[in-house]
Image: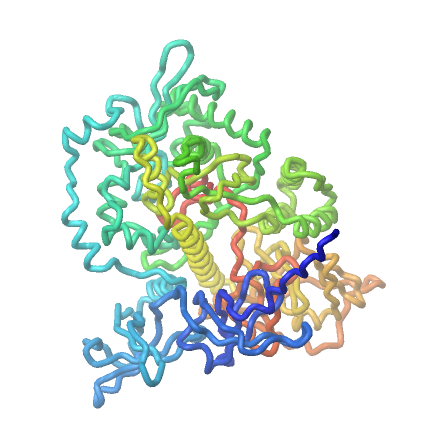
Amino acid sequence: MNKKKKPKKDSSQKKTFRGTLEMTRSGMAFVIVEGLTKDILVKQKNLNTALDGDEVLLDVIKQQSKGMGRMEGVVTDILKRKKTEFTGTLEVNKDKGFAFLVPERGAFVPDIYIPANSLGEAKTGDKAVVRIVAWGEQTRKPVGEIVELLDASDTNDLAMKEILVESGFPLSFPDQVMAELQEIREKITTAEVRKRKDFRKQLTFTIDPVDAKDFDDAISIKKLRGGYYEIGVHIADVSHYVLPDTALDKESDKRATSVYLPDRVLPMLPEKISNELCSLRPHEDKLTFSAVFQMNEKGEIKQHWLGRTVIHSKHRFTYEEVQDIIETKEGPYEEEVLLLNKIAQLLRKERFDHGAINFSSQEVRFKLDENGAPIGIVIKESKEAHQLIEEFMLLANRTVAEYVAKIRINKQPVPFPYRVHDTPDEDKLKVFSVFAHKFGHKFDLDNPDSIARSFNKMLQLAKGKPEQHVLETIGIRTMAKAIYTPDNIGHYGLGFEHYCHFTSPIRRYPDVMVHRVLAECLAGEVKPDKQMEKKCRHSSEMERKAMEAERAANKYKQVEYMQQFIGESFEGVISGVAHFGFWVETVDTKCEGLVSIHNLLAKDEFKHDESEYALIGLHTGRKFRIGDKVKIRVLAANLTKRQLDYDLDEELPSPAGKPYRGKADKKERPGGSRNRPGDRSKPDDRNRSGDRSKTGGRSKGGGKPSKEKPRGGKGGGKSAGKKGA
């Protein structure tokens, strides 16, 4: 007898949900819940101190009717605050002995009350960073304390600090952390050296950006018999100094990553550790955790060894110096450098042959004057010197992950922060394949391997063409997001079955966790971390926030740089299209701005064709499609909003061959509607929808390209393979 199947439960009929809260300008909010097609409305009176970006628990107080309308809820608990520090302007009432911080526009937080005992020398009009420490019992309004008064006259410093605080990163380390630093033993003892393999007599050197201060990896090389070499990848042993459950460890976990802005680094670890104790500076003994390989010139590995070491770097190379050696075959240790590069290129080829996707790497770098103002923009690409380091770091990361993946505790895998990258979403791939086909590229979507081959073929054929950058950018957005998780599903983009981050513990907390678990596994004393999944989720979230801050700071500097070119023309490539205009990225400087539909109406009437990724002129037939080259003129540069406005600087021919003059008002209207996906602005409650993406636009929340790719250093940051892989 067939049993009657129970109908699937509709998740929308649940009473309690967990999600992320997004505020609107009207004061209401929506909670985004994974798995629901519509967000849940929360009126201002039901927020219960929840702020924009908080992770909340809420009860549904009004269900949608027959699939119509929207559920309404009340926040019952705040599971995780997005941030507790805010920037703004102080309003001080000296007579009554208190003040308010009026947050920056768009912060979606009420004015913060500051009692007299926290005011110090603060006065009305001062810019400040304030931390929320409590909420009024009766008023349910935030109560804060001043963390730092900001110098409003230093516009660059003010802007960068506002971006960091806006993204949820503290500007300074707590007193308890700084006190703990004083207790750390700096001298390397003989007893400690005896516990480690000694590499101090082997040729060892570092390769980093010219402005780097934290050198967290080094390479050693020694010739062996039989055509083999011993190549060591040595990583700063941060876990020797940062011990579990200390204030220093908790703060590192909280930050999870260093943040690299154009003019500064906000470090995950205090400078005493990042730039001194753990930095693998030349001519100093340093403690390291190493992956050592015996391999031949073909890149074939005979055996490997993992363990703690002590090294002594003989030389500090910059990428430019190593690239010069590769190109001229001359320079310090040229024989070793050239051999390492030869092996790295073979490892790289093997990786792509086995399914890795070859997205190129371009990095926007700024030339700054003594005040931090941009005086030039340089686009840096990954060269062989970067790839040399990248491939050996990838090899070490993969080897560590493979080792840990084999170990079992009570027949269960060891909790471990794998770096994973899922296969692409099928629906997104179909859309992208249609887009790529418009440029003459075909995609085989049969299986993950054929998809990877299709991507690589497309990228190879598009190289050097106007559409190259657009295809790469949108292709990357098609990919899943790489994250940290104990669930080892492999890394699709790199083509690895097992992968982790081992090589950058100075600036990534997951690497510190990897070092600790690896040390336990090597010692046979594994203590499974029950909080591993939670820590991985937090690190992934903080990585996203750091990327947001880096993008915001880069955009600020690009807008600041373009202020001097108001009225001037540039060649550009269309990078996104919406019904209200299209975005253009300048060819030479990668500065993106909006060409508003209001200005285009002076030239023609346009319709937005989503299937063509284009705006199409109804009278002229002119098509503005993603990837097309256009000439633009700079109309406006708004530093406060970090926005550039462009106008089309070319005539549109009519079907008869004459320029179309148009019927619209020709008065320029820079700005216009620009709720571009990825902007920090939020839609109001009247026009909010579940999916705010536009053709070719950024993904929700400023969606960073999600597939990992090499990323160059930023203001003392690390290089391609180290920072991104």
Residue 38's x, y, as percent?
61, 68
Residue depicted at x 23% and y 59%: 174
Colouring of the image: rainbow
Q: Residue furthest front?
A: 1
| Quarter of the image where one finds residue 618 | bottom right
Residue depicted at x 26% and y 47%: 244
Q: Is residue 243 above or below residue 14?
A: above
Direction from residue 598 to residue 31 in the image, left or right: left
Direction from residue 540 to residue 423 in the image, left or right: right
Q: Residue furthest bottom?
A: 95
Residue depicted at x 63% and y 45%: 468
Q: Is residue 213 above or below residue 351?
A: below
Which is more toward the observer, 491 or 106? 491
| Quarter of the image where one finds residue 694 | bottom right
Residue 200's x, y, as percent?
24, 25
Question: Does residue 82 appear in this view?
Answer: no
Residue depicted at x 16% and y 54%: 179
Residue 449's x, y, as percent?
64, 35
| Quarter of the image where one finds residue 99 | bottom left
Q: Residue furthest top?
A: 226
Residue 42's x, y, as percent?
51, 76
Number of numbered markers: 0
Question: Does residue 673 appear in this view?
Answer: yes
Q: Is residue 336 above or below residue 167?
A: above
